[in-house]
Image (cartoon, rainbow, N blue to C red):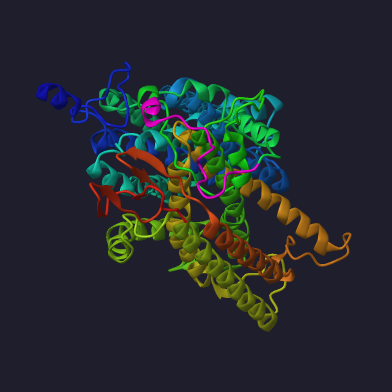
Amino acid sequence: MIEMEGDKQEFTKDGSVDLRGRPALAARTGRWKACSFLVGYEAFERMAFYGVASNLVVYLTTELREPTVSSVRNVNNWTGSVWLTPIAGAYIADAFLGRFWTFTVSSLVYLTGMVLITLAVSLKALHPHCTPDGGCAPATRSQITFFYAALYTMAIGAGGTKPNISTFGADQFDDFDARERHTKASFFNWWMFSSFIGGLVAVLVLVFVQENVGWGVGYTIPTVGLALSLLLFYVGTPFYRHKPVRRDAATGPARLVGRVFRAAFVNRRSQLPVGDPVSKLHENDAAWYAVAGTKRRLQHTPAFRFLDKAALISSPGEASWLAPCTVTEVEEVKLISGMIVVWLTTLVPCTIWAQVNTLFVKQGTTLDRSVVGVRIPAASLGSFITISMLLCIPVYDRVLVPLARRRTGNPRGITLLQRLGVGCALQVVAVACAYLVELRRMRVIQERSTHGAHDTVPMSIFWMLPQYVLIGVGDVFNSVGILEFFYDQSPEGMQSLGTTFFTSGLGVGNFLNSLLVTLVDRATRGGGGGRSWIGDNLNASHLDYYYVFLLLLSVLNLALFVWVATRYEYKAEFLGDGVTRSGTPETEVTGGKGKVMDTPLMMEGVRAV
């Protein structure tokens, strides 16, 4: 009997398995030993993506000879697609293939796209010929078709890699093990750190190589790096832990949401119990969940109370043609509904972030960019966002979190939504800073009479540095916080789909940015005779008015976010022995004694706010 108990302790406690479906050995699999094979891929994937995205508009205008408006639209459409395709990839992973196999297939598609793009810019037959004096022949239809086919092949591959690789990394830590829970709290910070390293190399090195050495060399470097990182990923296969696929996810979450809302509508005239909220609600016992092993039992919460009617048990003699849902199923739908509400409040921050590669760069091109006799590209200031994030993540993880942890008792230091709130507030300050810089730029224009479209305003571009730094520091709270929030709050077995809330927000933010700029331009131009806030000549426009508009939008969104956050109910899972796991400060109760845990836990019955 003792040996059997000892054998059980060798396996992970969260039900994870190895590639063959056998229980995963805790000592030999997972943790940072497994994640070390993953972080390399993330760095090279970010290098490949930003190596293409950051300079794509330059290639389209200078090599394929596209008009500026068309090239900007095509870049936005492709970037938006890259961030939206993960919705399909996450669904396939959660419902059918699992995260490992979805990533494996998609990463090969992604690599194929990178190889095709590299060929498109390298082989003479696949791109227009240019003469030494800079003249280039127009691109043929076949050349354009091949290039965009390569781009969208890469976008399709991104759909299966982006939502699954980070989630698969988080799966390597056992929530039921105290030490691994503590380590997992830092995982997303260091994951994003490796992502920022890849992006920084792309902006500072690859862009320079593309424009000064050759586009073929500039794309070959990240393509080769991506191939090597995939090889390293496959080498680590024996060390990975896998979460079993929930086969019922193949019919949901859409069907789950539909079933719960349909049952709640059918029982809309029924009265919910007063006092004890779960006395007449259907739920399977703990033994059922232990045997099923496909999901964890969730604690009842008062949020979206009308949905509780989906779990009402019919009274004796009362006919019901629809079987009641369980409390856990209802709570899963509540989680999805709550995540959608929070996601809506992240769209404005994503739209603000989209200004970095558009109006911030446009604003910078009008300023004095001379540094020690060298004229730097306006887009190069974007590297300060990445540098700020790289410097701040270790400070946040190693200094701020321990300090806050001692005051709050929360192992994260602050709650997930508090972290997002800080990020939103910093973005408001960044937009205000951009507005003040623009005011000064407009004053210098008036004083020096530099109203021409190509006139350089005698004002250093480094006046814009604070707004870039604030965006970077804010992203430490926003980007990392959003990724961790949607992973943590997703129903069991749907974490990949939850992670797509993060990527889809960026995609929608890109599309919203294009729409917003277009509508504001049309509205302020006044039928073609007016003075647009965002004209081709920024020295004769009113970009300051547009920044005021963005500032008001950000402030209103921050107020809405605070309202939503104070009413959000965190996920509370039963971990056994009367203990639940939530996203708030916590205690674990064992034998009547409470103690602070390494992961957000709370006593059964305590409301998560």
Q: Quadrant of residue 132?
A: top right
Q: Is residue 35 above or below residue 126?
A: below
In this view of the protein, which residue sits in the foreground, 497 or 307? 307
Asked whether, in this view, residue 112 is left or right of residue 352, the answer is left
Is 448 contained in the magenta span?
A: no
Residue 541 in the image: x percent, y percent? 74, 68
**Image quadrant where one finds the N terminus:** top left
| Residue stretch in magenta | 271-289
**293 relative to 536, above or below:** above
Image point (45%, 31%), residue name: 493
* Image: 210 above or below 93: below
Q: Nearer the viewer, residue 327 or 53?
A: 327
Q: Residue at x 51, y 22 (%)?
A: 248
Residue at the front extreme of this rendering: 317
Above or below for 259 versus 549? above
Nearer to me, 393 or 481: 481
Instruction: Name the dominant secondary structure of the magenta segment.
Output: loop
Find residue 270 and report its image quarter. Answer: top right
Direction bottom: furthest residue: 447
- Residue 58 shows up from this direction: no
Question: Residue 169 location, x and y as percent?
Answer: 35, 36
Residue sticking out furthest to the left = 2
Q: Which percent across, then down, holds residue 309?
A: 62, 38
Q: Position of residue 423 (x, y in %)?
A: 48, 61
Residue 5's image quarter? Answer: top left
Q: How many marks?
A: 0
Nearest the viewer among 435 and 424 is 424
Q: Is there any visible trace of residue 256 in the rendered image?
A: yes
Q: Is residue 429 left or right of residue 70?
A: left
The residue that appears at 88% across and 64% down in the rendered structure is 529
Within the magenta stretch, is there residue 282?
Answer: yes
